[in-house]
Each structure stands twice: as C-alpha cells, then as structure tokens.
Image: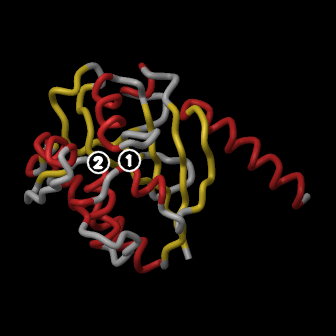
Amino acid sequence: MKKVYIITTYTGTVLSFLIRRISKTPYAHVSISLNEQLRPMYSFGRLNPKTPIFAGFVEENINEGLYAIRTNTMCRVYSLDVTDEQYHKLYKNIMNVSENREQYDYDVKALLYLSIDRPREKEFKYVCSHFVADMLEKSDIDIMNKPSYEVRPNDFYDYKGLVLEYEGLLSKYYDRNKNDMYLRRTVNA
C-alpha cells in the first residue's frame, strides 16, 4: 500500500474568493501529490503567479510561485491509501498530462457552468477539481460517485474516505512534518 495526498487550498486571491463563493466551501483549489512532502503538487491553475489570465497544468510547491506571494494560504492536506498498482497508474496518468501539457487548457467556461450547477466535460480542458478527480478515476481510484467533470472542491472537503493529515497555513506544513518526524524518532528510539 502507498499513500497519495490531496491538498485543498484557499489563497485569498480574487479568483479564489469567487470560486469559494460558487463552491460554498472554505477551500477553492485542489491539488494532488504523490508523496508526503508534497513535492510537487499537481493541478490546473495559474501559470504565472501574478495573474490568473494564463492557466493550465501546473506543478506547485510550497513556498514557491503563488504560495510564496500568498504566505497566508490556508490548506487541508488529506491522505488516501492506494494499492501499488493504483499508485503507478496515477503516476503514469499525471506524467502523461505533464509531458503533453501544451494540449491541455484551463477550462474557464467550466467555472461558469459549475456556478449555475451545469457541469460540462470538454476534452483536454480541466479545472483543478476535475483534473484531480479524473486522474484518480483513470487510475482505478474511484472515490467519487459521479463523473470527474462534476467534481467540485467541496466534494474533497466533504468526502469521508480521506484522512485529514493537516489543516492550517500551507507555509507551516513542513514545520508540522518535522515535528511529526521528530516525534516518530523519539517514540521509536
């Protein structure tokens, strides 16, 4: 068994505020990581941290890009147990998008459609929640009872099958991890 990590964030930008209002959840953005260090987190979001105009497939890191500018970003980090086979499929699916990123676009219209409760599916276009749900679904990790294009950030927030590992400032996540690692060494010493 392996773990994958699903990260929900709220940066406080104008766009995240609007998404938060539409989705009616404290967190507006969703990413996925294949390791506990969250290096990197994969998602669909802004390509330039200073403007939401250009968006697409992104590899995010704590304290870099938008998160370096928005140091007060709040987050929830969840873990999900998966089989070795599911993990490898997930890795391959994410790498396929990464290697072909020029074919993919951020689906701005999907945000509008979600706001009126009419989700849409468009080939090679994603919003963050659709991307994460689709990568899980294509990897035989079926945690949602609906098509991936209908998934919203609050579906991850509300899903009972995820284990909440951390909630707080994203910029403090590593501090929390170091303390946990220290405690594990102390207990096992």
Few, some or many C-alpha atoms within 10 Å of disc 2 (few <14, some 14-19, many ≥20)?
A: many
Q: Which quadrant, please, contains the N terminus?
A: bottom right
Coordinates of residue 117 in the picture (x, y in percent):
20, 52
Coordinates of residue 14 in the picture (x, y in percent):
30, 22
Left or right of 119? Residue 65 is: right
Coordinates of residue 86 in the picture (x, y in percent):
40, 76
Question: 184 or 70: which is nearer to us?
Answer: 70
Question: 23 or 180: which is nearer to us?
Answer: 23
Residue under numbered circle 2? 128
Q: Which quadrant, please, contains the C terminus?
A: bottom right
Mark toward the start of the polypeptide (2 vs 1): 1
Three-letter amino acid code at disc 2?
Answer: Cys
Left or right of 114? Residue 132 is: right
Classify 18 as above or below 108: above
Question: 107 or 35: which is nearer to us?
Answer: 107
Classify 7 as above or below 50: below
The residue at the point 89 percent across, 52 percent down is 186
The residue at the point 50 percent across, 47 percent down is 38
Classify 141 as above or below 11: below
The residue at the point 39 percent across, 74 percent down is 141
Q: Secondary structure at mark 1?
A: strand
Q: Secondary structure at mark 2?
A: helix
CA separation, marks 2 and 1? 6 Å
Q: How many numbered discs? A: 2
Mark number displayed over residue 30: 1
Whether tag 2 and tag 1 are in contact, CB under 8 A, the answer is yes
Coordinates of residue 54 in the picture (x, y in percent):
16, 30
| Location of residue 137 by image quarter | bottom left
Few, some or many C-alpha atoms within 10 Å of disc 1 (few <14, some 14-19, many ≥20)?
A: many
Three-letter amino acid code at disc 1?
Answer: Val
Left or right of 162? Residue 58 is: left
